[in-house]
Amino acid sequence: MPEFSSHKIELIIECFTAKNGAEGKKMGKALIIGCGGVASVTIHKCCQNSEVFSEICIASRTIEKCDALKEKLGGGKTKITTAKVDADNTGELINLINSVRPDAVVHLALPYQDLAIMEACLATRTHYIDTANYEPRDEAKFEYKLQWAYREKFKAAGITALLGCGFDPGVTGVFSAHALKHQFDEINFIDILDCNGGDHGYPFATNFNPEINIREVTAKGSYWENGGWVETEPMEIKRRYDFDGVGEKDMYLLHHEELESLAKNIPGIKRIRFFMTFGQSYLTHLKCLQNVGMTSITPIDFEGRQIIPIQFLKAVLPDPASLGPRTVGKTNIGCIFRGVKDGREKKYYVYNVCDHQDCYREVGSQAISYTTGVPAMIGAMLVINGKWRKPGVYNVEEFDPDPFMEALNIWGLPWTECFDPALVE
Ligand code: NDP
């Protein structure tokens, strides 16, 4: 990751806006909903990018967190306001959007709120960006179906919904669109590899919202093959891979959001899999917590009131936003593609390596929040400046990848290409 002295930031912004002409200079106002680990990074990045984000409003359930960030980052070129909002309440959201009048709403709260916020965007004709697909609270299941169902309504309202604009999903979709545009005539196989080689020193902690993270990794795995889903038991499929910048790690096949959209949007695809690395301590703790019922989402009676075990567990685990100062090591997230170019078989690997401590020095967060928060800012920028604006509901791979790939290099997530990668068996 490049070093971000303020002088260098000003220089790269100048280059970026010069290259992108008047359109790149369009200024705008974003309403950012949520003020946790990911939102904090996006907000830092919006403030670095005041050429586009002349104003932001930070709105969340706990307004004190929004005010603390305003206190830290206010006084720069980006004007910051704050508000309290319950993002489960569409009426409250509509009132907030009507009073802020943003160009786009960037939803960085939790996946439970996707539909309420999309409804509010529809009612106020405001562009929408998120990083995670809708999940009902009472069922650990995520799919795009309910968000895609808004496509015609968003089209008719003339507004854009950009879904899943973090790293994975997000950059992994942009990498796929980039590979298809510049490297292949047809892509047949994609393996998405998400490696976190970081160490926060705790025996057990999650790098993003614990409730969402544990629901994801305790679910059954699945991958897309020959036009259908193949389901696996949780953590059933294990592989080992030697990651650039990190070294050898065990990784496990999971179901992941972008498999669903890429299976639909990459023509000629035969198989897509997603692997994530986990250390032994994490897996042992998780197994034990599962065995004693602490990861359950079914409410139980406790001292005369109903509690949900996984929400109680979240309350006792370290806040992911607090892991920044103690996390050392690197992440490496990318995609290995196999397909055909000019009649010949070809392989191609594109990935980003991100250093936890570099992120902490720059924005006070660890690399998981950083690698999600930066793409969210880039997606919002491209919607606001019009480069990624088309009425309807879309996943990132449905847009031109070039301005996004360029912005990744500028805003702290440079990518590396490899034309002869080791393949995953
Ligand atoms: P955090 O738990 O750190 O932050 C969530 C924020 O949302 C908190 O500020 C919380 O408020 C706020 N919030 C929750 N419920 C409401 C509500 N009803 N109304 C208003 N605000 C609410 O989560 P992260 O920052 O780690 O994750 C944010 C999102 O990013 C999640 O959806 C996650 O799934 C997604 N993500 C996506 C990734 C990707 O690569 N695509 C990777 C990692 C995360 P409070 O402060 O009061 O708790």
Image (cartoon, grey):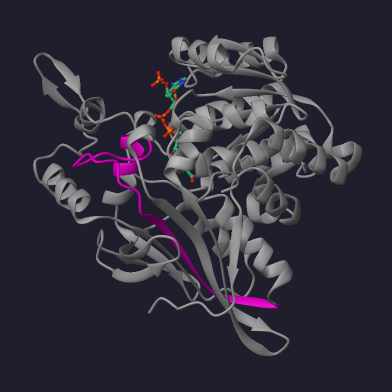
Q: Residue at x 64, y 83 (%)?
A: 340
Q: Quadrant of ligand 1?
A: top left
In x, y percent, where is residue 256? 43, 55
Tell me if residue 202 comes above or below residue 103 in the rendering: below
Q: Which residues are magenta?
A: 185-214
In x, y percent, where is residue 221? 33, 60
In the rendered structure, the answer to whether residue 322 lies left or right of residue 412 reads: left
Examine the image and state in which quarter residue 32 appears.
Answer: top right
Viewer-proximal residue among 191 and 272: 191
Viewer-proximal residue among 270 and 320: 320
Tell me if residue 259 comes above or below residue 299 in the rendering: below
The residue at the far right in this view is 22
Q: Is residue 396 magenta?
A: no
Residue 265 can be seen, yes or no? no
Q: Residue at x 65, y 56 (%)?
A: 397
Examine the image and state in which quarter residue 416 appears.
Answer: bottom right
The residue at the far bottom in this view is 343
Quarter occupied by the C terminus: bottom left
Examine the image and state in which quarter residue 186 appears.
Answer: bottom right
Residue 301 can be seen, yes or no? yes
In the rendered structure, the answer to whether residue 386 lies left or right of residue 206 reads: right
In the rendered structure, the answer to whether residue 202 lies left or right of residue 53 reads: left
Q: Residue at x 19, y 47 (%)?
A: 286
In x, y percent, where is residue 407? 70, 47
Q: Is residue 191 magenta?
A: yes
In x, y percent, where is residue 187? 61, 75
Tell me if residue 272 comes above or below residue 137 in the rendering: below
Number of marks in the rendered image: 0
Q: Residue at x 18, y 42 (%)?
A: 203
